[in-house]
Amino acid sequence: MFLGHEIAGYRCVNRRPVKMGVMIPGSVSSVMAGFLLAASLAFSADFPMRTAAPWREAAPHPASSYRWTITPVKGAGAELLTLVGRFDGPGQLATEDNVPLVAVLRDTLSDANPDNDRLRYVYLLTLTRPNIGQQVLSAIPFFYWRIGRGNQSGVKGPPTPLLDMSDTRRRVWKRLGFNVLQWTALDPMMMPVRASSHAYRTNLIDHDRLHIEEALSFLRQVPTDSTGKALTRAELDSVIARLTLAKNLLGGLMSATDLERVARAREAKRAETIARNWELLRTSAERAGLIFEPLQLGDGASQYAVLWFRANGSFSAPGISLKTTWKLLHISNPWSDTRLNPTTRYVSNPGVTAAAGRQRILPEWKGYRQERYLDANGRLLTRGQSGPTKVTLVPLAVYSLTYPRMPLLLVDFRSSMHTKWREIFQRTRDDVITGVLGLSHFTNWYYYAGNALYQFVRSRRGTAVDQDNRLDCYSEFRVAVALDRSLDPDFRQELQSSMQRLAMNPLETSPGREADTARANYIALEKAATNPAKLPERLEKDRRKELAAFGESLRGKLAQDMLHYMTLGGFTARVPRDEDNEARLDRDRRTESLIRYLRELAYSGVDPAVSFDVVQIRSSMDELASLIGAASSKRMRNQAVAVIEKLQSEFQNKALRADCARVLLAMSAGAADVAGTNDRKPMASVLIPSTVPSKAALQVQ
């Protein structure tokens, strides 16, 4: 069984240890009034659409369809790693083999030491920025359609990073700022302004989330690199974890030390969800007389499933009510559909026998069908295999197995607009409440309390009420179909057409346009990497910003962020330019990596000498002692002392405890030397230029 991604250590690649209730004020009547209002407005909202993750291992592929290309950033000590693979839009079967999909900038400081490497910018090269017309349409309330193929004006300049991994808090403050602006300035205004601003913000957030999930879909297809030239498993998992957290409002505030724990928990939960939905959908299909088949798309695991209807088959379940089964599957009973089962019409005609009706195979079905074989036990064989029984199958529905609590309907082949209309009804309800009626979470809390209770009950009864997870499922399935080459071409085209009809966001771009956009973005990004005034200049500024923030507490970082946004970006904490900045950055990064590695050992719950390499532990402590003496951050020195003291208390070996005492003594001596130097001379004598009074010097850029 697939156990999810192992999220490895963060930025400490070669030192990865390997083991051998809320009170709501108000009256009861107010809560009941809110509940009744919510029930009256939320009468129709169980649209399936949108999440993702693998359950069981996919069959091994002889060769991966993806590879990494490396472009050095001129004169900056960094490299641009680009994931190249296949990506097919509608009507582009087997033609798009070398499409650049995702690019990641790795800051190496011009050396081969992975301890001081940092991943900075993540680019989604298939991302097309919406044009003015799309933005205007997205601000129209109750407009849930995508017009045309998207922006046709071409790429102008290098793409904007989808995520800056060195400053994940930026996304948090921007989104919080827009929310405060909406609540305080736009919501009190007249209804057209309020409704338009809510519609635009909703479409913008959905557009951003859709492309984050698209980038995750690409990265989950990447094989593990063993050459050291591409992203390592630890680096790849850290990118996936950061992108996953970026979908949450406060996800950017997650510290690097907690990243591994949270990512592992999410992957384990997703694997559990797929396993449960797999079994639930399979048993429901057997109960209803349908054929369940896992649907493996691309190089990933089977996280989708399709239900087939056997043409001219027969089914009966006397004494068993299938009402709850059809409600769970979110499709109508195919056995009573005369397009699929013509005998239901002929048995009532005395001139035509049921046997004669069965001889006419799907006379009224105009959609896709497939000829397959069953084995001697009646099990469906894979496409291309032969068996004793030949059958004609009609696809009924495709489901995502990653939506929490239930399989999520993505495609209904008998009703192309079934899923879209359900989503439109739910979006309309939300837009009426927030945009037209202007109900606020603060003044109308009783409505939202009642609505939350009502939605909770509906979710427990099998309704997909989580719009964010539906959007994730839709986005990942959209990418999975574009990446796949294993399906029957006609069936794949049918799936792509269905996903085209599900597009609701005016900001969205047609998948057929994204391959051309990806190539243009890649060319622009390569030009920016060789232009000293573009990518190298941005990287140099971000390095000086990293130096200014090194060793700062969370409170200090938040204060710097507040000053930055209060001045509309006019103030940014950076150290001045200096030729020694790169050496200081190398020292600070190695110090940070060593502290993180030793802290993981100290809090492993077992004696580190038993479970980990003692030689590596000793060398890491010695290296930390040599680096921390020159560290310009008192907070980092205190952290280093604390982690060595914790290790000393965990060791049972007297020699190792003595080593810890020796390292602590060396750290104290180094700290005293630094303090004495500061009394006689500015910090400039310790790898800091004499023109800089201290490491925390700030420069207004």
Image: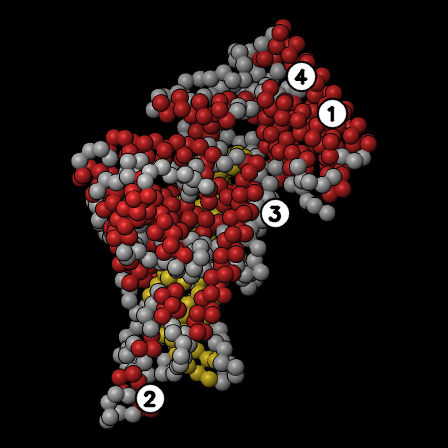
Question: Looking at numbered disc 4 in the image, what kind of residue is underneath it?
Answer: Ala
Q: Position of residue 215 (x, y in %)?
A: 43, 47
Q: Determine the residue positioned at 29% across, 44% down.
A: 29
Q: Quadrant of the N terminus?
A: bottom right
Gap in angstroms between the C-alphas marked 4 and 2: 91 Å
Nearer the observer, 592 or 690 = 592
Dot 4 or dot 3, earlier in sequence: 3
Nearer the observer, 496 or 644 = 644
Gap in angstroms between the C-alphas marked 2 and 1: 86 Å
Marking on residue 359: 2
Q: Determine the residue positioned at 54% across, 14% down.
A: 694
Dot 1 or dot 3, earlier in sequence: 3
Q: Residue furthest right?
A: 654
- Is residue 132 visible from the viewing direction of this image? no
Dot 4 or dot 2, earlier in sequence: 2
Gap in angstroms between the C-alphas marked 1 and 3: 35 Å
Gap in angstroms between the C-alphas marked 2 and 3: 60 Å
Is 215 situated above or below 574? Answer: below
Q: Residue furthest front?
A: 28
Question: Looking at numbered disc 1 in the image, what kind of residue is underneath it?
Answer: Val
Disc 1 is placed on an element classified as helix
